[in-house]
Amino acid sequence: MTKPTGEYHRDASDRLCFEMFDVDAIDYPKLVARIVAQFDLKSSSELVVGPDQLIGVHTNGQCSIGLDWDSWSGFFVTAHAPEAEPLVKSIGAFLSDG
């Protein structure tokens, strides 16, 4: 996997997201494993697998984020509430540094 690039934005629900357009579905498990290990996250739901999407909800015990992939957006990290925004920013910085 080449080093993907990412950017922050707000989704239609005004939630902070860090999106990496150039990540393939095949890279999702490895990328999620790196994030989970680095930030001591736990899965808080079963992985939802659809024909063009992967949806995983994770928590650090204080806040919840989505670690998701779809064929339109690539890989994205989404804050499920405002208090999760610092975690999304930290994950974005971690992924941007390699």
Image (cartoon, rainbow, N blue to C red):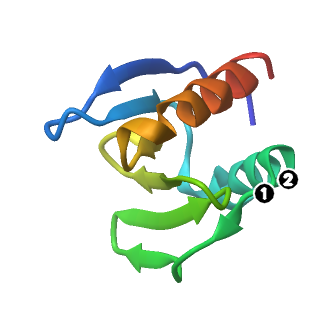
Mark 2–mark 1 distance (CA, rounded to whole Å): 6 Å
Q: Which residue is mark 2?
A: 37
Q: Secondary structure at mark 2?
A: helix
Amino acid type, residue under disc 1 in the picture:
Ala
In-front residue for pair 50/15? 15
Residue 35 position (above or below residue 42)? above
In percent of width and height, residue 23 lies at 56, 39
The quarter of the image holding the N terminus is top right
Q: Which mark is residue 33?
A: 1
Residue drawn at (47%, 32%) of the image? 85
15 left or right of 29? left
In percent of width and height, residue 36 lies at 76, 55
In percent of width and height, residue 53 lies at 38, 63
Assess disc 2: are there few (<14), some (14-19) or many (≥20) residues with their C-alpha within 10 Å of its C-alpha.
Answer: few
The residue positioned farthest toward the right in the image shown: 37
70 left or right of 59? left
The quadrant holding residue 33 is: bottom right
Asked whether disc 2 touches disc 1, contact meaning CB atoms under 8 Å apart, the reply is yes
Res. 56 in view = yes
Amino acid type, residue under disc 2 in the picture:
Ala
